[in-house]
Amino acid sequence: MQTIDLLRKLSDAFGVSGFEDAVRELIRDLVTPFVDEVKTDALGNLFAIRRSGNPNAQTLMLDAHIDEIGFIVKWVEEDGFLRFAPLGGWDPRIVPGHRVEIQTRSGRIQTGVIGTAPPHILSDEERKAPLPLGKMFIDIGATYREDVTSRGVRIGDPLTIHYPFMPLTDDCVTGKAFDDRAGCAVLLETAERLAGQDQDVNVVFAFVFGEEVGLRGARTAAFQIEPDLAIAVEGTIGADMPGVPEHSQPVRLGHGPAISVADRSIIVTRKVLHAMESIADTAGIAYQYKLPTYGGTDAGAIHLTRCGVLAGIVSVPCRYIHSPISTLRLSDFEATSRYVTELVKHLPRAVL
Ligand SMILES: [Zn+2]
């Protein structure tokens, strides 16, 4: 599949934290042709496994999280408005005034809007301060609580602000969920590139749930896989934009894959970091560092599993993550995808 179509399908799929079924089934279909076995676990991780011909082979875990930040319906008012709570880290300033898609118990999508009081009726004070999430509401066009329930919308249904994938230029695309469907797409392309080649390691592509609510899937995934080495692949904080000084831009678009040295969840072992640098140099892939110590990743949970696991992080630079309009460059994506394939080929021998 063309990269642009892969990103479109993945970003448009519904997959709010804890409600990842639709995106997981999509990924299952896409990865199955390239691996020996596909399986899921009780909580919703998906593992796609490529076994080495060597029975004593060690195991490399490639991780990407399938969930996206969203919301959950927490109350239905008598006049048909919905109250909601966040799943994952939202900035309340950007939430009002958008269209949302609510996934009902039956899987039907109900469209609604996050209403906002017109400026005409706000006091000076109200206009200055962002409205807290707890005071916001969703309007699905209902008049009574019964209208809401008759459409199948109930307390506990997940929802997300939905902006469909869209190219901005030949190289720049925008969509709602590149954090971390960009990482999922990297894993899928890597699986395709490796198909038919023998490696000296078993490779487990781990598509994990619940990263945005506390690295939940990665923790149980790593326990089961018992990897000797892991690489987490993320869509991460591109902040090269007006008003942000260069030293506060964790990563920048157009500068290739970002290698993490340290974030809030892990300090990458020097041996792993040095090997990652030299593999990029040898392959002629230009890279950047993700500046310490912004954000946390699944690698944080994975490296603390059992007796400890060597782990590294590679990211596709994405602007505006944790908003419905994440934006990336296909050229950065393509370089990251090639780089992760090189890492699968060379990193295990370099560090294990
Ligand atoms: Zn993420």
Image: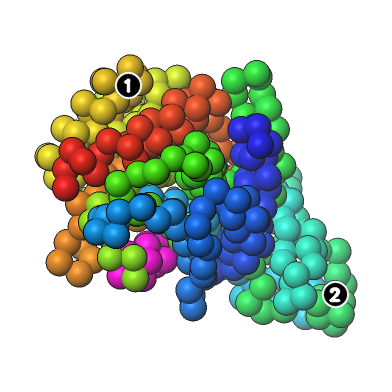
User: Which residue is at the front of the view, 231 or 38?
Assistant: 38
> Residue 206, image x and y in percent?
43, 57
The residue lying at 55 percent from left, 26 percent from top is 330
Quadrant of res 298: bottom left
User: Which residue is at the front of the view, 175 or 272?
Assistant: 272
Q: Judge the density around disc 2: few (<14), some (14-19), many (≥20) Cα neighbours within 10 Å.
A: few
Tell me the kind of residue under disc 2.
Answer: Arg
Q: Residues in magenta?
A: 210-223
Quadrant of res 224: bottom left
Q: Secondary structure at mark 1?
A: helix
Question: Left or right: 201 with respect to 277?
Answer: right
Question: Left or right: 269 with respect to 106?
Answer: left
Question: Left or right: 291 with respect to 316?
Answer: left
* Residue pointed to by mark 1: 283
Q: Quadrant of the N terminus?
A: top right
> Residue 256, image x and y in percent?
40, 24
How far apart marks 1 and 2 lie (CA) works out to 55 Å
Tell me the kind of residue under disc 1.
Answer: Ala
Q: Which mark is residue 323?
A: none
The residue lying at 86 percent from left, 80 percent from top is 150
- Residue 136 in sight from this viewpoint: no
